[in-house]
Amino acid sequence: MIISSSAIVLSKLKYRDNDLIVKLLVRELGVTSFIVRGGSKKNKTNYFQQLSLLEIEFDFNSKKSLHYFKDFENKFSLKTIHTDYKKMGVVIFLSEFLSKILVHQEKDFELFTFIEDSIKYYDDTKFNSSFHLAFLIKLSKFLGFFPETENNHYKFFDLQHGCYTNTEDSKYLISHEELECFNMILGINFDDLNSLTINSVQRKNLLDNIILYYKLHIESFVSVKSLEVLRKLF
């Protein structure tokens, strides 16, 4: 079956001498892996930078784990996320994060559109050191465990159950300053991130809490190696 679709590059891995194995989130199919002959050559590898947005055509076979492109091209000419070193650090982190949580992701148009629109927004706007925090919170909505927003005046937020509480009956509670930062990022629009006033320590703690939140809600989620790279940037 020939499929023509938009796609987002999640990861790439050098294979043999000159080939690449790339994992894409394909709009019409979900997560799909491809082998690119001669993909490590510069004229091809530029297409497969992390979170690049592509238009692809390929022959899909449900019995195969690796597919071959019939054609591929850039859907959008991204200008900054692969040249601005701070944005590149965020892109490396987010692409690895997405690769680890969307392992068996099937077709989901709303999820795909959210990720694609977020990438385009990030590319079109000035660098903001809290973009990835808002992205991860928003992403949880499409994965089915967006935090409950009612009762945000309560003393604690329970990361395990995704809700606010006044009782200390969980070992995954956040409160005080950590809760204030969590409340600030919860539901914020990308356009409002410049008004967010949190320092680097608060940002680190907030990211740790968001990652823990994902680990508590996705059983197979493992550590993200590029997290340390991200920490060195901010």
Image (cartoon, grey):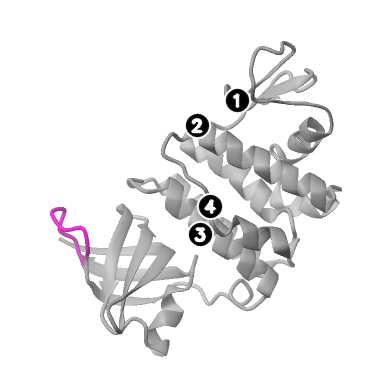
Mark 1, other Cα within 10 Å: few <14 / some 14–19 / many ≥20: some
Contact check, label 2 and label 1, Cβ < 8 Å = yes
Q: Mark 3 and mark 4: span between their CA atoms?
A: 10 Å
Identify the magenta region: 59-66
Mark before the other along the chain sequence, 1 or 4: 1
- For mark 3, give the secondary structure: helix
Viewer-nearest residue: 203 or 113: 203
Mark before the other along the chain sequence, 2 or 4: 2
Give the amino acid at mark 4: Val
In the rendered structure, the answer to whether residue 99 lies left or right of residue 205 reads left
Mark 2, other Cα within 10 Å: few <14 / some 14–19 / many ≥20: some
Residue beneath label 4, please?
224
Residue 154 image-quadrant placement: top right
Contact check, label 3 and label 1, Cβ < 8 Å = no
Viewer-nearest residue: 6 or 218: 218
For the C terminus, the image quarter is: bottom right
Residue occupying the point 41% across, 48% down = 102
